[in-house]
């Protein structure tokens, strides 16, 4: 009887000893600045799911494989903070970053980030909504951030020369035959080039965001540009 009682006491003691250890499972945070203390969900020894991590900096939000990933709020030691999307410990996606400035109002930057680098107010500053089958490819570039606020549309053929695309029975070179504005405005349209390998047209004093349906003979493309600047649209046409 005494032997059985002794075994029971020893078993209970072992359980009581083991339970606190399992409750204190080590859960690693892979960003050194917030790795001193962690509270939250854990998976395979790493922070995973909702949690809070502290060190010289502080983070509260979602984790994946030990890194801030998903939605979260990060505060740096100097007082700056960012709330938004994260991926493997870096700002990545839409968010708002606030910079603290001594004796001045906070500086707030909102928009999209990619691996800690600010991309801009939009994830992509332009959208190609549609294009008909003889427009093989469209490339859009922002040439500068100046105040010119213009859009140049260049047309060229993928095999050299300019196809007519049904512009006229005489087979005239393809050109922009109509611009149907869907958002924004422009002051005037200027022909910039008319050569054997391409034509181009420039829209000046454009108001952004700008969206239009560009007619090129029987073909068309619908393009939207969201932010100001000097833009180049290159459309490559098939015969």
Image: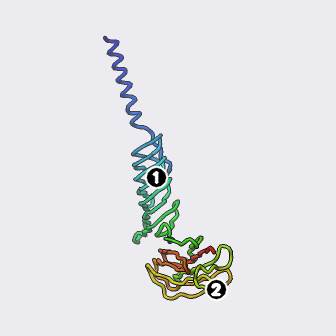
Q: Is residue 35 above or below residue 145?
A: above
Where's residue 36, x and y in %? 45, 47
Q: Which residue is mark 2?
A: 194
Discs 2/1, front: 2
Of mark 2 and mark 1, the one earlier in the sequence is: 1
Q: Quadrant of the C terminus?
A: bottom right
Mark 2 secondary-structure assignment: strand
Instruction: Relative to 84, say whether 1 is above or below.
Output: above
Q: Identify the element where label 1 is drawn.
A: strand
Q: Which mark is residue 150?
A: none
Left or right: where 72 falls relative to 118: left
Residue that appears at 34% across and 20% down: 9
In front of the other: 127 or 228: 127
Tally of marks: 2
Give coordinates of residue 171: x percent, y percent: 63, 84
Q: Nearer the viewer, residue 112 or 150?
A: 150
The residue that disc 1 covers is: 68
The x, y position of residue 22, in whole percent, is: 41, 34
Q: Position of residue 123 (x, y in %)?
A: 48, 66
Quadrant position of the N terminus in the picture: top left
Circle 2 Cα neighbour tier, 10 Å, few/some/many (<14 / 14–19 / ≥20): some
Question: Splitting the image into 4 quarters, where does residue 41 fall?
Answer: top left
Residue occupying image coordinates x 36% and y 28%? 16
Q: Spatial distance from mark 2 to mark 1, Cα to Cα?
A: 54 Å
Q: Is residue 94 above or below residue 201?
A: above
Q: At 49% across and 88% down in the image, what residue appears?
A: 187
For the rendered model, the colour scheme is rainbow
Mark 1 residue crowding within 10 angstroms, few (<14) / some (14–19) / many (20+): many
Of all residues shown, which one is farthest toward the front?
A: 169
- Horizontal side, residue 71 vs residue 1: left or right: right
């Amino acid at each position: 009887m005494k032997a059985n009682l002794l075994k029971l006491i020893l078993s209970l003691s072992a359980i009581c000893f083991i339970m606190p250890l399992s409750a204190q499972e080590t859960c690693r945070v892979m960003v050194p600045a917030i790795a001193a203390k962690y509270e939250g969900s854990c998976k395979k020894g790493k922070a995973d799911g909702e949690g809070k991590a502290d060190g010289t900096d502080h983070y509260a939000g979602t984790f994946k494989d030990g890194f801030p990933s998903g939605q979260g709020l990060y505060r740096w030691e100097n007082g700056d903070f960012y709330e938004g999307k994260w991926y493997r410990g870096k700002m990545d996606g839409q968010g708002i970053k606030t910079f603290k400035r001594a004796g001045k109002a906070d500086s707030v930057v909102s928009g999209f980030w990619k691996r800690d680098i600010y991309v801009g107010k939009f994830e992509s500053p332009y959208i190609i909504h549609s294009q008909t089958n003889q427009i093989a490819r469209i490339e859009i570039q922002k040439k500068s951030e100046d105040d010119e606020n213009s859009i140049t549309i260049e047309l060229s053929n993928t095999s050299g020369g300019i196809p007519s695309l049904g512009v006229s029975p005489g087979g005239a070179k393809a050109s922009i035959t109509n611009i149907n504005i869907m958002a924004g405005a422009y002051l005037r349209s200027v022909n910039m080039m008319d050569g054997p390998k391409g034509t181009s047209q420039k829209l000046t004093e454009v108001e952004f965001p700008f969206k239009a349906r560009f007619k090129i003979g029987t073909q068309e493309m619908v393009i939207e540009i969201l932010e100001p600047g000097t833009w180049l649209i290159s459309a490559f046409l098939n015969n």
